[in-house]
Image (cartoon, grey):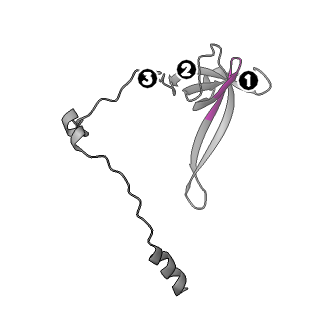
């Protein structure tokens, strides 16, 4: 029987789920051309892989290696974390942050703000002839 250890397949994919203990779901995207039309066809295959340290999160790019069956559906092992897909977003308290004027929108000086009159929409009075004239024409 031939030695198989050195020839195990390795794939690179994106983590889609890490909700299980020490197991992640990796989506591997394969692009090939259609036999007749030549158009690229994109297929996604999902593999369950063993993540012993629970370090992978959804969105990460990982390399997985084929292994012996570890459970009913798990036959792959994470070999390395290539790139993390999530970045920490700092939480900003909106009450503390105030908008500062930029060069594109200069702030008005207090004297200029007082000079500009407020815009008030005035309602036009309805004329009785206009309403009566419409009824007369119909």
Q: CA distance from mark 3 to mark 2?
A: 42 Å
Closest to the camera, between mark 1 and mark 3, is 3
* Callout 3: SS: loop
* Quarter location, residue 6: top right
Closest to the camera, between mark 2 and mark 1, is 2
What residue is at 62 percent from the left and 13 percent from the top?
Answer: 53
- Could you tell me what secondary structure mostly forms the magenta stretch? strand
Q: Earlier in the sequence, mark 2 or mark 1?
A: 1
Q: Which mark is residue 1?
A: 1
What residue is at 33 percent from the left and 50 percent from the top?
Answer: 119
* Callout 2: SS: strand
Q: Which mark is residue 128?
A: none
Q: Which mark is residue 80?
A: 2
Residue 13 in magenta stretch? no
Depth check: 31 or 118 in front?
118
The span picked out in magenta is 17-27
* Quarter location, residue 81: top right
Q: Earlier in the sequence, mark 1 or mark 3?
A: 1
Check if mark 1's residue and mark 3's residue have beta carbons within 8 Å: no
Is 132 situated left or right of 47 in this image? left
State whether residue 108 is above or below residue 135.
Answer: above
Q: CA distance from mark 2 to mark 1?
A: 30 Å
> Where does label 3 land, which residue?
95
* Outermost residue, bottom side: 137
Q: Position of residue 9 (x, y in %)?
A: 62, 29
What residue is at 42 percent from the left and 65 percent from the top?
Answer: 125
Q: Position of residue 89 (x, y in %)?
A: 47, 24
Closest to the camera, between mark 3 and mark 2, is 3
Q: Position of residue 90 (x, y in %)?
A: 46, 21
Q: Residues within 10 Å of mark 3 (few under 14, many from 20)?
A: few
């Amino acid at each position: 029987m031939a030695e198989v250890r050195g020839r195990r397949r390795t794939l690179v994919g994106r983590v889609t789920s890490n909700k299980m203990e020490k197991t992640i779901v990796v989506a591997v995207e394969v692009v090939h051309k259609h036999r007749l039309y030549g158009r690229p066809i994109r297929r996604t295959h999902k593999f369950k892989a063993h993540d012993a340290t629970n370090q992978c999160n959804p969105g990460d790019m990982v390399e997985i290696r084929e292994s012996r069956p570890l459970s009913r559906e798990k036959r792959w092992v994470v070999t390395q974390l290539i790139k993390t897909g999530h970045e920490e977003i700092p939480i900003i308290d909106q009450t503390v942050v105030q908008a500062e004027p930029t060069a594109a929108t200069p702030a008005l000086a207090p004297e200029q703000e007082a000079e500009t009159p407020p815009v008030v929409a005035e309602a036009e009075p309805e004329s009785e002839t206009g309403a009566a004239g419409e009824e007369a024409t119909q």
